[in-house]
Image: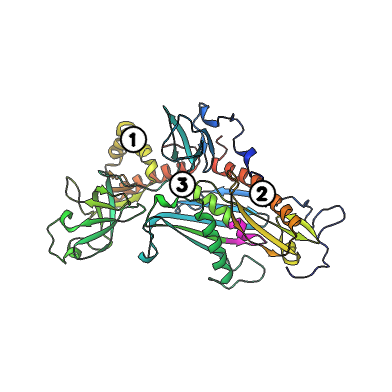
Amino acid sequence: MGGYGDVQMIDENGLRMDGRKPGDVRPITIETGVIPVADGSCRMTWGTNEAIVAVYGPMEAHPRKIQRQDRAVIDVAYNMAPFSTTDRIRPGFNRRSREISKVTKDALESVVLLELYPRSKIRVSIEIVSAEAGTRCVGLTAASVALADAGIPMTDMVVSVASGKINDVVVCDLNKEEDNYGEADLPMGVLPNTGELVFLQMDGDLSPAEFKQAWDYNVDAAMEVHKLMVEALKGGDN
Amino acid sequence: MNSRPVGQPDNMSIESSADGPRDTRRTLVVVPGEDLGSSEGIEAGHGVLVVGDRVISTKQGRMSRKGNTISVSPLHTRYMPRPGDLVIGHIEGCTNNIWFVDIGAPFNSILPMSLGPAKVEFGGTRKILDIGDSILCRVQEVEETHQSVVTMKGMGLRKIRSGALDELDPHLLGKLIGKGGAFLREMKMQTDCRIVVADNGRLWIDGELENILEVRKKINSISSEARMIGVDA
């Protein structure tokens, strides 16, 4: 939300700078089992975003003070590689990565059947290798696939997509320019089978009608992405 | 805000009728959250959950139906201990009278002094088994909270002092052992190695170095083959 309101990002035919229509999603590829030593892993490319997620566990929770007697805990570490953007990112944790780790953990906790593994820990490491815009959505979606790949019981898989507003037009799946110079951003996490919402953040202003439009774009895109996730996990077997 | 039921039209896979995909003859690979049909007259087995009047899968794996029970056997899974399992564990820590053993399960096991390999003085646990040692032991009991107790009292249970250890996903052990133990027996004959297959997916291979390497090569090939989806246990 840079406030550069005069940057023209959508033409008179309703096409965006990368040729997409307002409701289109960037191309997505999903691959599982990319890290042999991990219990479950996933590589997901979403436009020029690329995330690699490894899942370890359920395993003994250390230190012992983090153990819960009635359920497992999920330990999410979201990290952007220093080389993932044109500006080098200082390695290590920062406020943003802590926030994203927390919201990702909260979203995943609502689907994983944690009560089956009391006092243990499931470790989810999300590494963003290449970042354009919407890395939290890519990270969360890839984490769901990696958890499924690790055989961890879940009621559903979280699919996360962001929509936003550019030049007063609501569009789905913002790219870097649209994210930087746009007016609003609405990332959402949806459970495709039950229709529940497990994650929502909003940056910028949207009117109720625009919010509904962005919501619908997110839900429709989540259904498309879910099909790709299922395809990746089934490996063309069905 | 939005009352539209999200995802309802996409709930079922292409070939499924309103009754879900379960009546097809092939064993289907299902993913978490996938609708497996109505729960009427159905018992939920491993890896499935009844939500309202529908049965849903909670794991990625192959769906099977035996009688009225629907279950999903996962493609990848962690070892879950059961009483009587032969396991290979690593000593992770100890107190004056207890060893903590990592058996590859979601929670560590304990090996009390009374079930140890030898008579131990109180406070002398580290003299018998130190941190980092590997042991062949048996699961004695598993509590409701998944905490388990292992024992070293029994035939053949010992501290591992020679040979090499390797790991395989627990669900692939059937593939390594073969029908009636045929594959494993053949491998033992061919390589002249002593191979102990523990239920937690760990293997103890003892013999000449070249032979050990030969066995490990074969095990790795089983593991990498299985990484390709569709290979069953």
Callout 2 amino acid = Val
* Residue A187 x %, y %: 65, 58
* Relative side of B68 to B194, left or right: right
* Residue B135 x %, y %: 24, 54
Callout 1 amino acid = Phe
Do the residues at pointers 2 and 3 share their chain? yes
Q: Nearer the viewer, mark 1 or mark 3?
A: 3
Q: Secondary structure at mark 2?
A: helix
Callout 3 amino acid = Pro
Query: Which residue is located at x 55 percent, y 65 percent?
Result: A79
Reading the image, the residue beneath label 2 is A219
Reading the image, the residue beneath label 1 is B183
The span from disc 1 to disc 3 (Cα, nearest Å) is: 32 Å
Which range is magenta?
Answer: A128-139
The span from disc 2 to disc 3 (Cα, nearest Å) is: 24 Å
Q: Which numbered dot is residue A2? A: none
Q: Secondary structure at mark 1?
A: helix
Q: How crowded is the residue under tag 1: few (<14 C-alpha within 10 Å), some, or many (20+)? A: some
Q: Quadrant of the C terminus of chain B?
A: top left
Mark 2 / mark 3, whichever is N-terminal: 3
Q: Nearer the viewer, mark 2 or mark 3?
A: 2
Picture quadrant of residue A210: bottom right
Reading the image, the residue beneath label 3 is A153
Q: How crowded is the residue under tag 2: few (<14 C-alpha within 10 Å), some, or many (20+)? A: many
* Residue B20 x %, y %: 55, 32
* Relative side of B140 to B31, left or right: left
Do the residues at pointers 1 and 3 share their chain? no
* Relative side of A9 to A234, left or right: right
Chain holding disc 1: B
- Residue that protrudes farthest toward the bottom in the picture: A90
**Residue A88, magenta (yes or no):** no
Q: Secondary structure at mark 3?
A: loop
